[in-house]
Amino acid sequence: MTSLELEGYQSGREFDCSIGDVTGRIDPDTIEAAPLQRGLALWRSLAGDRLFPARSQMSPRALGGLLRNTILIKVLDEGAEFQVRIIGDVIRAIDPDAWQGLTTREMDARLPGHGSNLRAVYGHACTHKAPLAFRGLFRRKADGWTFHREHLLLPLGESDDAVDHLISLIVVIQPDI
């Protein structure tokens, strides 16, 4: 299992942000997948002079063709917990468990460690109020299926004071879904 330290993470501790077995954090501006480039451009245009746009601005209509690659995550307890609200078709295809409606603690009850890893990565995005991007291999623990993906995590909130939702955009590079 590969672990890495996210610079500036509030506790400074190392944690597994792979959400699988291998990954790598990248600069969001180096995203190669066209849908994620469109998602980042949309997010930036809607944010304007703010740190990030409001959840209401990232509506299904605004996301359009990106919906199938989208996970909407609600921030609970000021970032101490997270709940998966909506999951797009691409994510359902790669993870039939689909976690929809579950909190990260409930995920841990089904697949120990999975929710904790997500909570750490989501918490980082909330603390830093900035996009996170990853590129690399993802290994689904349930059956060992491995694929390459790019992943963009975007904070949302009604004011710059707090993140209340996250949009996770994922593109599977291999196999083609």
Image (cartoon, rainbow, N blue to C red):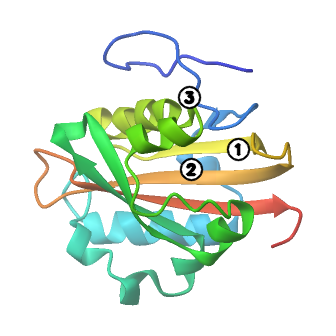
Vertical relation: 102 (above or below) 86: above
User: For the residues marked 3 and 1, what is the alpha-carbon distance in whole angstroms?
Assistant: 21 Å
Amino acid identity at mark 3 = Gly
Q: Looking at the image, is mark 3 or mark 2 earlier in the sequence? A: 2
Using a 10 Å C-alpha cutoff, classify the residue at mark 1 as few (fewer than 14 neighbours), some (14 to 19) or many (20 or more).
Answer: many
Q: Residues within 10 Å of mark 2 (few under 14, many from 20)?
A: few
Q: Calculate the distance from the C-alpha at mark 3 to the C-alpha at mark 2.
A: 30 Å
Identify residue for label 1: 135
Residue at the spot 62% in from the left edge and 38% down from the top edge: 19
In the image as oriented, which residue stretches furthest toward the right? 175
Q: Horizontal placement of 94 versus 6: left or right?
A: right
What residue do we see at 16% from left, 39% from top?
78
Labels 2 and 1: the sequence-earlier one: 2
User: In this image, 127 relative to 70: left or right?
Assistant: left
Foreground: 5 or 86? Answer: 86
Residue positioned 52% across, 79% down in the render: 67
Picture quadrant where residue 94 is located:
bottom right
Residue 29 is labelled as 2
